[in-house]
Image: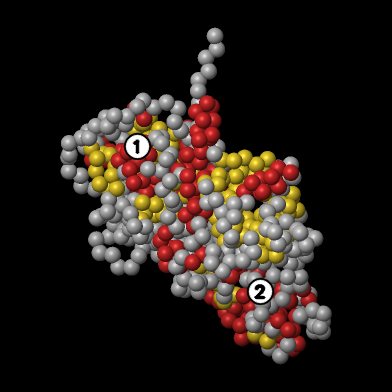
Amino acid sequence: MNPLLQVKLRFTGEKNNQKPGARNLRAKAETSTEKIDELIDSLRAVLRFYKDNPRITDKMMIDIWYNDIIAKSNRVRELLKPSRQSTNDTVVGARFSDAPEGEENHIITHYIDEKTINKTIEELQVAKEFLQKRLGGKATPMNFAEPNSNIDYEGFSLAKGKLRDLIIDCSVVEKFDVPRVTEVPDRDTFLITFYKSELSLSLLLEKLRVDDAQLPYTAYGDDTISVTRDLFEIINDKIPYMISMISADLSSITLEDISPKKRDEYDIPSPKNEPVIGVIDTFFDESVYFGSWVDNNDYISDLEKYQNDLNLRDHGTEVTSIIVDGPRMNPWLDDGCGRFRARHFGVCSSRISTIRLVKKIKDIVNENPDIHVWNLSLGTDDEVSRNFVSFDAAALDEIQAKKNVIFVVSGTNDNRETREGILRVGSPADSLNSLVVNSVRRDGQPASYSRKGNILSFYNKPDVSYYGGDYDDRITAYTSYGTEGVYGTSFAAPWISRKMCYLIDVMGMPKEVAKALIIDSAAAWDYKTMATKSKFVLGYGVVPVDIRKIVETESDEIRFVVYGTSDSYRTANYAIPVPKDDDNKYPYVARATLCYFPECSRTQGVDYTDRELSLKFGRIVDDKGKISDINDNVQDDADSRMDERQSRKEFRKWDNTKFISRIVKNSNKPVKSYDDRLWGLSVTSKERLSTQMRVPLNFGVVVTLKEVNGINRIEDFIKACTLRGWIVNRIDVQNQLDIYASSQEEIHFE
């Protein structure tokens, strides 16, 4: 076995010197006079709606229905453009159409004044006249192709550039409409989030004449309230166009019926300075044999009514028992990580309001800055929306983007008595920055209660799977009554929390690198050949049991991690000295995994992540630093014609995890080097919103090189890196354990 290597590369920052070409209709797209008439009619219908339904805001919410998944650079520029503003400045939300997965298109919501809508109608009439008189009633890409275009633009009230942009805009728009709610949870209470306007939440409700005494609600933040169905009906009747999102307002635990048993008492040593994992769950029973390993906090004001009900302490106790002493009860799951201390926060008995849960989580994390890994095995029965991230998931993403913590979240269970089809996961398993864990049986097959991703019809969730048991294939945990056979994603997640804490607190790795290692170990060389259906349920795959399978590699492989910060358009290194064979070729198959924790905007709906990091890794092919990427990633190349849908599907654009890999085959052969050039790694950054680069963004990358002839070349790689002046650390498990133990010793001065 070879050790994992940590290579401290020197990255360079590069500006974006690419100049966008002249704008044109996309291939096979067209704009006709009939199409413009349809768009004018839909704009007039919007105006009629607001005339018949007097609004309480200064402006109007209006949807632009696109005919594709649209990149920010291809959104409309002149349609609905206010004076002195970009159209992107008026965006308040984005969702997908209800078409089958893979065929959905963007619907983007804008907040626009009536004057701008009327101006757009007038400009469209001019564009229609231009098409009739100059282009025979229809525009195609050939009409605007430069430098052969010789169209006469004189005689119209709009300039050449504006006319062209209007016609190009029309080619990507299907219609305009008023936002409406289509999915309402079958619950007595739920959360409503409003589109952003000039009205504060309190003023908006005041204008609706909502009486808090008669129709109670709880407000959270600037745009969200928890409502009863009666209050929802009033809001939906008066201002349906102001409702941006509706989601469940209840996180819950499915409690098992547990028969009292003779309590098993194990010997356990006293805790020393073992690393600590935070647990947010139901209450914990301090009388269990490992109670001294747990710092218990009943984080609830009305605890007295739950004080003597041990059943309400079972779930939290079971989860924490796995974190502290799971391998003792499940020898086949001995991960080599040892025992962990836990700081347990009992926040509920079996159910809790999402708003209350989020507030408690924020307070708990703020008050415990020494904890880096948090286990959260709470969730909702309702499926997450296809069009927005849940309220609690967005809160977790915000915390992780700003603080040095990571949440390991259970993938939620399908608790239906009769299962027809497979459910999407429940919140907060749609948290992008969290490490979301689904459950498998001992044979590695998905558990019978498994739920699926993707999130927002695109983002890859769950991240990974692990052994959480099944009804007839249980794992062992410890309850208030003794050992008990359990099953559920609640009990898969704490095993991954153990591994994450080991990597971060014992091995000393940044959370970005630790998350990348977990995902990379699950994906390995098989992910590219995994069936799509399996990916929706298993994520990137099943994480190995033994921690050594994550921090060590086969003798014919070189695995190294790099940690960097993106603070420019491109962050790159073009001189990675991958060893060659005797024929001056590179005898490797390669893979790489990138992880980062971006800030996100829930109000942007399906366009959720604010920042995109695109990964390239491979051989350098020319003197300009062009990388022959192992995933053939060309989306950022100057001559790329790749559309947004393809970039998302093939290169995971906007996803905060990137996994790229060649497929290992018996026929793999060494590949040539280009004039003795080395290998390169680049990370390209793009912003979603109309902002410049706001803050540096950390990232972690795991790279694996598999030698196709089975030769161990790790020493050659270490030597070549060292000669370049780079620091290379061998991540040796025992050495790291010794270092951690020494760092935790108390020093007494005499």
**Do the CB atoms of the residues marked 2 and 1 lie less than 8 Å apart?**
no
Look at discs 2 and 1 and give the one toward the viewer: 1
Image height of 354 relative to 23, above or below? above
Q: Secondary structure at mark 2?
A: helix
Q: Secondary structure at mark 1?
A: helix
- Residue 319: % across, % down: 34, 42
- Residue 731: % across, % down: 56, 40
Identify residue for label 2: 169
- Of residue 518 and residue 193, the one placed in the foreground of this image is 518
Q: Which mark is residue 325?
A: 1
* Horizontal relation, residue 655 to residue 186: left or right: right
**Residue at horizontal 63%, vertical 55%?**
613
Quarter of the image with the C terminus in it: top right
* Horizontal relation, residue 734 to residue 218: left or right: right
**Residue at horizontal 60%, vertical 44%?**
5
Q: Please name the colour scheme applied to the rendered image.
A: secondary structure
How many numbered markers are drawn?
A: 2
**Residue at horizontal 28%, vertical 65%?**
419
**In this view of the protein, can residue 530 be seen by the observer?**
yes
**Disc 2 and disc 1: Cα gap in Å?**
61 Å
- Residue 23: % across, % down: 73, 73
- Of residue 439 and residue 80, the one placed in the foreground of this image is 439
